[in-house]
């Protein structure tokens, strides 16, 4: 039982290299960003469990007494268990969706209800707890994406920079705090559908697509080598040149896999006009891209490229890689201005009934 407000956060992430290839057993390099999602858990006496996700316009509440009356025996507690279709169908009845609810709102609510109803709420933050958080986050990913590789939940749990391959995770020792732009094209896409399209293309043209995946694997490994070299020696212009070439090559491979989009082409062209190199990150088909910011760039140069991107209708954040993983922030350690800033930042606030 929670006795106080609990504020936790986890970093956003980008995949540097290896998206899609990771689903087929290849290496991916993923990094946590200094852009965080905050989650506030707050006990209250309304007799309701309420979910407030302001960034995606979701505000729902369920009567706790009603939830307790429902037969939830189909949901085991304790170890993370897969959200199989049958369980999700039953949860849809519990969720009681309004008719005008969009698919992505339904999935977000289902992921919340599934985790809320299954998890034994305990505050423990040891290595095994992080394992548990990671496993639960993976189940949430499954609700939304179907058959995820597991790289996204891993990097948001442990933070830093991770090499991920078939469930095996290793952390890069001291990743350089590279500056990047994270750009949202705002073109909606379904990760599930894009992953399926790549699988179909691999089945249709195995001799063409398998070498593309092997080459993306080699790009991830080379990027890891360069990042480690940058951590041990003074980062030199050659390192940034190599990172830029790897970005360009991977972007072309991802286009060949069929996960590009005209909005992403535009993003790459606009940044290239400013001498900067970009690639899509994640599933592609729209969604987000990243741009490497070399250390020699001046403030006005960065501002100019950001303005050009927002001029295309994209959202743009300047951030750095290698942020800490899931963290708990005690209410007492935050002063009033921080709380005010958080009010504006909170991507999700769950108020849970005690
Ligand atoms: O679109 P995102 O940010 O969820 O990333 C998807 C990454 C893929 O490699 C395409 C799929 C996966 O599960 O790894």
Image (cartoon, rainbow, N blue to C red):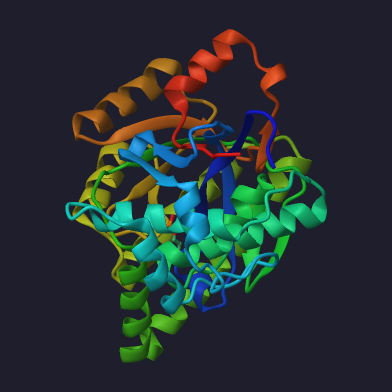
- Can residue 163 be seen in the rendering of this structure? no
Residue shown at 64%/40% (left/top)?
322
- Can residue 138 be seen in the rendering of this structure? yes
Residue shown at 63%/70% (left/top)?
165
State which quarter of the image contains the C terminus: top right
Which of the four quarters of the rendered structure image does ligand 1 lie in?
bottom left
Residue shown at 50%/14% (left/top)?
340
Picture layout, residue 114 above or below residue 346: below
Q: Is residue 181 left or right of residue 257?
A: right
Q: Quadrant of residue 198?
A: bottom left
Instruction: Report the front residue among 114 and 329.
Output: 114
Q: Is residue 219 left or right of residue 345?
A: right
Q: Is residue 207 left or right of residue 15?
A: left
Q: Is residue 228 left or right of residue 147?
A: right
- Total label count? 0
Picture layout, residue 256 above or below residue 106: below
> Residue 134 location, x and y as percent?
65, 57
Picture layout, residue 295 above or below residue 130: above
> Residue 7 location, x and y as percent?
62, 31
Q: Quadrant of residue 177?
A: top right
Instruction: Report the front residue among 6 and 68.
Output: 68
> Residue 32 location, x and y as percent?
59, 44
> Residue 127 location, x and y as percent?
81, 53
State which quarter of the image contains the N terminus: top right
Residue shown at 76%/40% (left/top)?
233
Instruction: Report the front residue among 186 and 204.
Output: 186
Q: Quadrant of residue 189?
A: bottom left
Q: Residue furthest top?
A: 336
Instruction: Report the front residue among 330 and 310.
Output: 330
């Amino acid at each position: 039982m929670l006795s106080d407000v609990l504020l936790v956060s986890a970093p956003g992430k980008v995949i540097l290299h290896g998206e899609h290839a990771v689903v087929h057993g290849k290496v991916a390099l993923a990094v946590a960003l200094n852009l965080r999602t905050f989650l506030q858990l707050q006990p209250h006496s309304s007799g309701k469990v309420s979910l407030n996700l302001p960034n995606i316009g979701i505000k729902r509440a369920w009567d706790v007494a009603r939830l307790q009356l429902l037969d939830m025996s189909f949901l085991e507690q304790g170890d993370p268990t897969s959200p199989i279709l049958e369980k999700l169908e039953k949860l849809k009845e519990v969720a009681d969706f309004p008719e005008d609810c969009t698919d992505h709102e339904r999935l977000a609510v289902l992921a919340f209800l599934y985790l809320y109803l299954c998890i034994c709420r305990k505050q423990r933050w040891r290595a095994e707890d992080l394992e548990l958080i990671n496993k639960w986050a993976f189940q949430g990913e499954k609700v939304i994406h179907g058959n995820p590789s597991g790289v996204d939940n891993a990097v948001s749990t442990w933070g830093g920079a991770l090499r991920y391959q078939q469930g095996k995770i290793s952390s890069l020792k001291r990743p350089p705090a590279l500056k990047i732009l994270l750009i949202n094209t705002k073109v909606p896409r379904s990760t599930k559908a894009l992953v399926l399209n790549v699988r179909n293309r691999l089945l249709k043209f195995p001799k063409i697509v398998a070498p593309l995946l092997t080459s993306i694997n080699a790009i991830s490994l080379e990027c890891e080598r360069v990042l480690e070299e940058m951590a041990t020696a003074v980062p030199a212009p050659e390192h940034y040149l190599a990172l830029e070439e790897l970005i360009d090559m991977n972007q072309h491979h991802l286009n060949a896999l069929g996960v590009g989009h005209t909005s992403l082409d535009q993003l790459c062209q606009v940044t290239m006009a400013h001498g900067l190199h970009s690639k899509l990150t994640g599933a592609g088909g729209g969604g987000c891209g990243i741009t490497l910011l070399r250390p020699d760039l001046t403030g006005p140069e960065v501002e100019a490229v950001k303005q050009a991107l927002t001029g295309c209708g994209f959202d743009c954040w300047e951030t750095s890689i290698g942020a800490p993983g899931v963290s708990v922030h005690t209410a007492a350690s935050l002063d009033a201005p921080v709380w005010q800033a958080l009010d504006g930042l909170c991507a999700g606030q769950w108020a849970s009934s005690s």
